[in-house]
Image: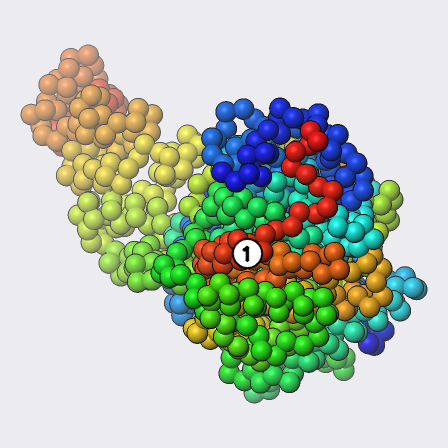
């Protein structure tokens, strides 16, 4: 697999690839993609892709507030917090 | 009530004996990432068969107040603030969680050796893997540490470890067990599953947990197929690449089934060889999106210092994810990329359509499909002939049920060289009753063999 | 000379009580990270659950924009990383949006009615907010998961002026439909624009996106600036590159964003957690029921029925409430242009003054369409004069009562006959005997004083004409 493609893909996935990774993971990724090409042997002309397994009726939820009392517990798990905000380095 | 279930009802009163029994076993096999055997049931909840029973939960399923590590450094410090629906329903029936079991990181693997947080060994032979990705659940059940455990089955992750550990591994029809609380890996393929040495318990757990959930819009009520005894079982006529041990048990299984009066119908599934690439294309694509939320901002692993937010996210993910997870995320990202999506992802979904059709045509002619659960017996840790790639190829018997959304059950079918070998029944959608019926009939002839050294009577 | 070609991408927050995919309250102004749950915070194991009302409102807008409505609408994941995104993918619609290929008319400032084609209408979720403070950015996910409707137009607009007018008319429309406040200041409406230029007859030029337009007036400025900039560049022999630019509202210019190569591949794929939605006949009927007469059509109809001026038409059709109010009051006051004119004048003049004074809106005021009509009827019938009418209006606001009731209570009924007026005049004459004598003797200047005294004594309930006539008789 083209190194450039691998790096573009890793960037899209927000994963850094170190020196060793490029070889090792690059090989694993290439192996999978080559293996996937096996599917080309199957004629799928005119077939609908299956986007959902076994789903039936329309499913909707009524527009009623379901108060979650978990807000405080959730922000407790923030790796870094300022008052009730999640903190990250400045975006700008 | 079955004998095992009755024995487990004594868990409370025989706690000390249990701890004396469980301690050494758990040290040997490492099935739990979090083990709280001192936990007690909430009194007064439920009076049914599950009331007062402890159970294990795979560590990618949410249990309030317990860690939800998913076997990953990324989530090693995350505690779940909520219960998965299946867990909540079991609790309401009086069962209680005594531990979170080990797994391949984020459910990705067939050995549990991809866990970043612990090592699990097969109770039958600790040099061997317990299977994956629900290896911890399978090992805990097989060692008699819990009467049943929950797992997740994306491509066989409940059935294969069950087969490796000599217990039942049940995957329901997609949607019938709610996915709410299951850390998503492949959304359109996975479901919670049940592992136990006791088929009755599997069925009770299923009955307790099944049905539509407001939190999961892909969840379904369990429909019933028209009542019809299992008469014809389809068998694959072009089985190749089976290890001799598995082949031997498979052929014995065929003769037992024939003996029981089932008609065995040889069938071919021409699309079976495309099931694995189709499965992994879809699973990895969905995984790449499902794991994107893990970036160290709202919870989870985070580097001590980062220059800017992108740096933060990349470091968090690079340090937090293991190699197999990274590989799958990258493959999944690639197959969705503009310019490649049609060729890979869309193609895989069309292949999926074909596979579903193929399987449906089998069920037009037979009530169940029989196959081995896995082509090899449990392999040893680090087996070079079963590297990550080889393990994936071996998933071919199990992934079909996930692609088609149909139920399947791995059942203990005998030993070979002292190791358990499991077979698998697959049924059409909503055909769970057929699975239990056939497996029960088989077990009457070929009883489940408990793992040597395990016991239900801890006072011995 | 270049033609300007403009398309708009408009986002509005829908007026749902809860978020698009979870039951958290969709309410502004609460403490940071208080309207959150595991779902909208992207915790492990959670699933989105589609809000029925968000879907309904999406279809309502699509229908109002005359779109083809999807018979099987699907959600998709749009994958990209940003700190304000809890899942690092947005649930949106790409393959099968709620509505496609629509069209809507608007009134251009040049006086003509123009049509803009709608490419699509789709439902999606909003991201959280970030506040930048020193070396930190602070993330608040209260807004993450809000129901957003995106409306994408075809590049049918041809000037900044038209784009602004179109956006305002779109704002009016969603307010009429009751699906959104459409308020750019509060962030319930956002708009990005695509601008290109070309010479007549040539194919479309390079499309440049402009973002960060935080007010409707910036739309016009930005488009005008950008089309000039592009013209200058092309005339200077430069080639334009497709890019995204930001509007700098302090310097009134568009500025290039630092673009990243290859970072915009969103890898859309169908959302597996939400089943496709297949609306049935009952659903479509319900959507029809929620349609309203479009603002432009209403404006046309009211203008013709009541002979409104352009300014009056603007005013009374600005919002659905005022349009309903106007039409109802005008009809009750007799229908026809005279009544319409009178009601419009009331609304634009004294009523507005009262609203300002009391800090109310028409919706929250004690003045109903019925009450305003009654006021006008009283005026028309001569039972009150204009001065009293204004007092009565104020009294309605002050005391929150019906004008008829107030009229009785306050005794402000007009004095219309000489019989009614006579005793009062006699009283005034009695109090001012010497003045009366003086006027009778020929001192005309003092007559004004007597008129004033009578007016005062009547509390303004007599018309000056009547007073003068009677005095003339008596003197």
Residue B168 placement (x, y as % from top left): 60, 52
Out of A80 and C253, give the one closest to the viewer: A80
Residue C336 visible (yes or no) = yes
Residue highlighted by disc 1: B445
Residue at the far bottom: name it. C201
Out of C233 and B296, give the one closest to the viewer: B296
Residue C194 placement (x, y as % from top left): 61, 68
What residue is rendered at 83% in x and 57% in y?
A: B381
State the scheme by which the image is colored: rainbow
The image quarter containing residue A71 is top right
Badge 1 crowding class, 10 Å Cα cut-off, few under 14, some 14 to 19, many 20 or more, is few
Residue C208 visible (yes or no) = no
The image quarter containing residue C256 is bottom right
Out of B240 and B89, give the one closest to the viewer: B240
How many dots with numbers?
1
What residue is rendered at 67% in x and 26% in y?
A: B15
Find numbered disc 1 in the image and state the secondary structure of the residue it sits on.
helix
Left or right: B166 with respect to B229? Answer: right
Tell me the subunit letter for badge 1. B
What residue is rendered at 65% in x and 37% in y?
A: B456
Out of B41 and B169, give the one closest to the viewer: B169
Residue C322 placement (x, y as % from top left): 35, 46
Residue at the far left: name it. C419
What residue is rendered at 16% in x and 33% in y?
A: C383
Left or right: C11 with respect to C59? Answer: right
Quadrant in the picture for the C terminus of chain B: top right
Residue C359 placement (x, y as % from top left): 44, 32
Q: Is residue B197 above or below residue B386?
A: above
């Amino acid at each position: 697999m083209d190194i450039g493609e691998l790096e573009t893909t890793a960037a899209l996935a927000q994963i850094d690839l170190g020196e060793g990774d490029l070889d090792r993971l690059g090989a694993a990724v290439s192996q999978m993609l080559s293996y996937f090409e096996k599917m080309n042997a199957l004629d799928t002309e005119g077939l609908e892709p299956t986007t959902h397994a076994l789903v039936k009726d329309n499913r909707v939820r009524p527009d009623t507030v379901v108060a979650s009392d978990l807000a405080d517990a959730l922000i407790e798990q923030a790796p870094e917090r300022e008052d009730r905000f999640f903190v990250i380095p400045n975006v700008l | 009530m079955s004998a095992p279930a009755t024995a487990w009802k004594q868990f409370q009163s025989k706690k000390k004996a249990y701890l004396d029994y469980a301690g050494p076993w758990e040290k040997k096999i490492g099935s739990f990432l979090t083990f709280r055997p001192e936990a007690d049931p909430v009194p007064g909840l439920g009076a049914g068969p599950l009331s007062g029973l402890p159970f294990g939960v795979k560590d990618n399923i949410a249990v309030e107040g317990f860690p939800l590590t998913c076997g990953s450094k990324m989530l090693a410090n995350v505690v779940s603030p909520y219960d998965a629906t299946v867990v909540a329903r079991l609790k309401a029936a009086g069962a209680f969680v005594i531990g979170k079991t080990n797994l391949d990181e984020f459910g990705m693997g067939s050995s549990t050796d991809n866990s970043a947080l612990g090592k699990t060994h097969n109770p039958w032979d600790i040099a061997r893997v317990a299977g994956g990705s629900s290896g911890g659940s399978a090992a805990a059940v097989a060692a008699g540490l819990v009467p049943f455990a929950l797992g997740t089955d994306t491509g066989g992750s409940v059935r294969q470890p069950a087969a490796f550990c000599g217990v039942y591994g049940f995957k329901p029809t997609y949607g019938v067990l709610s996915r709410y609380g299951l850390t998503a890996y492949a959304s359109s393929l996975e479901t919670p599953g049940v592992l136990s040495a006791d088929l009755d318990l599997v069925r009770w757990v299923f009955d307790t947990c099944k049905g539509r959930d407001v939190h999961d819009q892909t969840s379904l009520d369990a429909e019933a197929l028209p009542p019809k005894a299992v008469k014809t079982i389809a068998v694959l006529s072009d089985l190749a690449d089976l290890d001799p041990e598995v082949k031997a048990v498979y052929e014995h299984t065929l003769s037992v089934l024939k003996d029981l009066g089932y008609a065995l119908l040889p069938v071919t599934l021409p699309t079976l060889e495309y099931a694995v690439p189709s499965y992994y294309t879809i699973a990895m694509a969905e995984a790449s999106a499902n794991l994107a939320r893990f970036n160290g901002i709202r919870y989870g692993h985070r580097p001590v210092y980062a220059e800017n937010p992108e740096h933060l996210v990349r470091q968090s993910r690079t340090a937090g994810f293991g190699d197999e997870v990274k590989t799958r995320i990258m493959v999944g990202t690639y197959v969705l990329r503009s310019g490649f999506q049609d060729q890979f992802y869309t193609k895989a979904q069309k292949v999926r359509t074909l596979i579903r059709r193929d399987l449906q045509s089998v069920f037009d002619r037979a009530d169940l499909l029989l196959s081995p659960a896995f082509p090899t017996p449990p392999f040893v840790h680090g087996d070079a002939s079963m590297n990550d790639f080889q393990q994936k190829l071996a998933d071919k018997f199990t992934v079909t049920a996930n692609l088609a959304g149909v139920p399947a059950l791995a059942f203990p079918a005998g030993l070979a060289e002292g190791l358990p070998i499991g077979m698998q029944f697959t049924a059409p959608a909503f055909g769970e009753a057929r699975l239990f019926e056939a497996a029960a009939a088989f077990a009457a002839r070929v009883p489940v063999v408990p793992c040597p050294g395990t016991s239900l009577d801890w006072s011995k | 000379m270049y033609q300007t070609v403009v398309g708009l991408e408009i986002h509005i927050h829908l007026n749902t009580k809860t978020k698009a995919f979870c039951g958290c309250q969709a309410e502004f102004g609460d403490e940071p990270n208080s309207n959150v749950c595991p779902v909208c915070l992207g915790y492990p194991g959670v699933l989105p659950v589609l809000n029925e009302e968000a879907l309904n409102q999406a279809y309502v807008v699509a229908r109002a924009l005359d779109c083809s409505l999807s018979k099987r609408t699907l959600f998709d994941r749009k994958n990209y990383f940003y700190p304000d995104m809890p899942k690092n993918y947005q649930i949106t619609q790409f393959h099968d949006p709620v509505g496609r290929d629509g069209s809507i008319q608007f009134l251009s400032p040049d006086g003509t009615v123009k049509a803009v084609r709608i490419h699509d209408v789709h439902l999606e979720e909003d991201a959280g907010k970030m506040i930048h403070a020193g070396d930190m950015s602070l993330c608040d996910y209260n807004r993450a998961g809000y129901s957003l409707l995106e409306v994408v137009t075809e590049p049918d607009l041809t000037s900044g002026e038209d784009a602004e007018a179109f956006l305002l008319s779109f704002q009016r429309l969603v307010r009429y439909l009751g699906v959104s406040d459409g308020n750019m200041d509060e962030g319930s409406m956002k708009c990005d624009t695509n601008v290109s230029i070309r010479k007549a007859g040539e194919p479309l030029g390079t499309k440049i996106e402009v973002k960060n337009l935080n007010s409707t007036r910036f739309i016009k400025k930005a488009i005008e600036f950008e089309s000039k900039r592009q013209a200058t560049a092309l005339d200077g022999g430069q080639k334009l590159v497709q890019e995204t630019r930001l509007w700098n509202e302090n310097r009134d210019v568009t500025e290039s964003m630092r673009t990243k190569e290859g970072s915009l591949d969103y890898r859309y794929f169908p959302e597996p957690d939400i089943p496709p939605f297949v609306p049935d006949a009952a659903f479509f009927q319900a959507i029809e029921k929620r349609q309203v007469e479009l603002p432009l059509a209403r404006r046309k109809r009211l203008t013709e029925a009541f002979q409104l001026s352009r300014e009056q038409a603007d005013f009374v059709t600005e919002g659905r409430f005022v349009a309903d109010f106007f039409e109802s009051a005008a009809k009750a006051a007799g229908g026809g242009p005279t009544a319409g004119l009178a009601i419009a004048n009331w609304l634009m003049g004294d009523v507005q003054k009262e609203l300002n004074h009391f800090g109310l809106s028409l919706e929250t005021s004690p003045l109903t369409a019925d009450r305003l009509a009654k006021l006008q009827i009283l005026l028309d019938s001569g039972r009150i004069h204009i001065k009293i009418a204004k007092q009565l209006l104020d009294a309605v606001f002050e005391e929150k009562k019906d004008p008829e009731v107030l009229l009785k209570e306050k005794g402000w009924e007009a004095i219309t006959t000489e019989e009614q007026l006579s005793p009062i005049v006699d009283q005034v004459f009695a109090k001012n005997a010497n003045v009366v004598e003086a006027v009778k003797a020929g001192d005309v200047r003092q007559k004004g004083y007597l008129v004033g005294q009578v007016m005062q004594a009547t509390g303004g309930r007599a018309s000056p004409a009547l007073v003068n006539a009677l005095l003339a008789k008596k003197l």
